[in-house]
Amino acid sequence: MGLSEGELGLSLVGAPLGVQLSLLAANHLVARFSLAKVMIIGLGLIMAAYVGTAFASTPAIFFMLLFVMGLSVGILEVAVNLEADRVEYGLKQRIMNRAHAFWSLGFFATGLLGAVMAQLGISVLAHFVIFGVAVLVLTVLGFSGYVQAPLRPTAETATPKFVKPTAAIMVLVCLTLSAMLAEGSAIEWSVIYMRDVFATLPLVNGMALALTAFAQFLTRYFADRFVDKYGPRLVAGLCVWIMMAGAVLVATAPVWPLALLGFTCLGAGSSVIFPLAMSAAAQLQDRPAAVNVASLAQISFVVFLLSPPILGLVAEHIGIRHAFAICLPLTILSLFSLRGLAAKPRPSAE
C-alpha cells in the first residue's frame, strides 16, 4: 500500500482497539462457551482476517481487518490465561510462564518461516493461506476431547463489562507497561527497523522478529523454576534490566548484529513480566480471579492501543531508533512497581 511509518502506525491501532473492546465482553463469552469452541472460532476469525489483509487496498480496510483480528485476540487472551491459572492452581505449581512460552514458540516459528518465505519471494496471500489452514487443523486436532480444568474456589461467572481496577491492579499495570510496549514495538516494527536502518536482506529482517520470540520462549519456559526458587520480584527485576539493555542496544546499535542482540534482549526481558503480573492478579483474594485478570488486561492493553501511532509518528518524524528508546522511561516505572509481585518464593505444596 506504500504507507509511511505514521500511516502504518495509525492502521495498526485496529488490532489493539479490537482487543480492548473485546475485553469488555470477554468474561461473559469465556464463561458461556467451552475453551475448545472459543479457540477454534477465535483462531478461525484471526486467520480469516489475516488472509483478508493480503487484499487490503487502503489503510481503512487494513485497519478494519486488524480490528476484527483484535476482537478475537482479546477473548482468547482472557480464556487461555484463566485456563492456565486454573491448571496452575490444580497442580499447585507454577506453569503460567511455560504456558506463555509456547505462544512465543509459535511466534518464533511463524516469524522464521515468514522470513524464509519473504526471502524466497512467496506472496503474502499464499503465506497466510498456508499458515491459516495449518493453524486451524492443528487447533481442531489439539482441542478434540479437551477437558477444561475446574474453576478456582473463588471463581464466579457474573462480572461487570468494565472491571474497575483496584490499587493493587494499578501497581501491576505500571509493572507491565514497559514489557507491553517493548514486546509490541518489537513485533510490529523490528522487521521495518532492520530494513530501514541497515538495509539487510529479508531473511535477516525476519530474524529480528524471530529472535525476539525465541528469546521469549526460552526465558518463559525455564522461568518458573527460577521464580519458585528466588521469587517473582527478583526474576521480574532482572528481566526489566535486560529489557532496558535491549532498548539501549536497538536505539544505538552501529551494526546489525548488535541490533539483533538488542531485539533478543527485548524478547527475553519482556518475557515474564506480563505472565507474572497475570498470575499475581489471579491470586489476589479481594475479588474472583476472572475479575482481576480482566481488569489487568483491560488497562494494560491500553498501551497497545497507543503504542502503534506513537511509535509510527516518532519513527516518521524523528527516526525509528528513537521510537524504541521510548521503552526506557517505562522500564524505570516498572522497577518502582516490582512491589506488586511477591518478594519470596511460593511455599512448596507437599
Image (cartoon, rainbow, N blue to C red):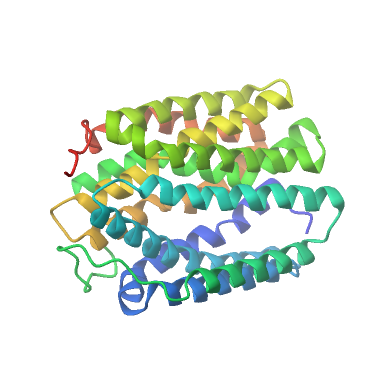
Above or below — where is 242 with respect to 180?
above
Residue in view at x 66 percent, y 28 percent: 259
Residue 23 drawn at (x, y percent): 38, 65
Above or below — where is 241 with respect to 14?
above
Q: Residue furthest front?
A: 350
Residue in view at x 31 percent, y 53 percent: 296
The residue nearer to you, when weighing 242 against 147, is 147
The residue nearer to you, when weighing 5 against 185, is 185
- Report if residue 301 is visible in the image: yes
- Report if residue 192 is visible in the image: no
Q: Quadrant of the N terminus?
A: bottom right
Quarter of the image for residue 2 reads bottom right
Above or below — where is 24 with respect to 208?
below
The residue nearer to you, when weighing 230 against 67, is 230
Residue 253 drawn at (x, y percent): 66, 22
Say whether residue 325 is left or right of residue 233: right
Say whether residue 50 is left or right of residue 94: right
Residue 157 drawn at (x, y percent): 23, 73
Quarter of the image for residue 48 reads bottom right
Q: Quadrant of the C terminus?
A: top left
Above or below — where is 107 with respect to 210?
below
Q: How many marks?
A: 0
Residue in view at x 79 percent, y 53 percent: 117
Residue 247 drawn at (x, y percent): 54, 29
Residue in view at x 47 percent, y 75 percent: 144
Q: Residue furthest right?
A: 121
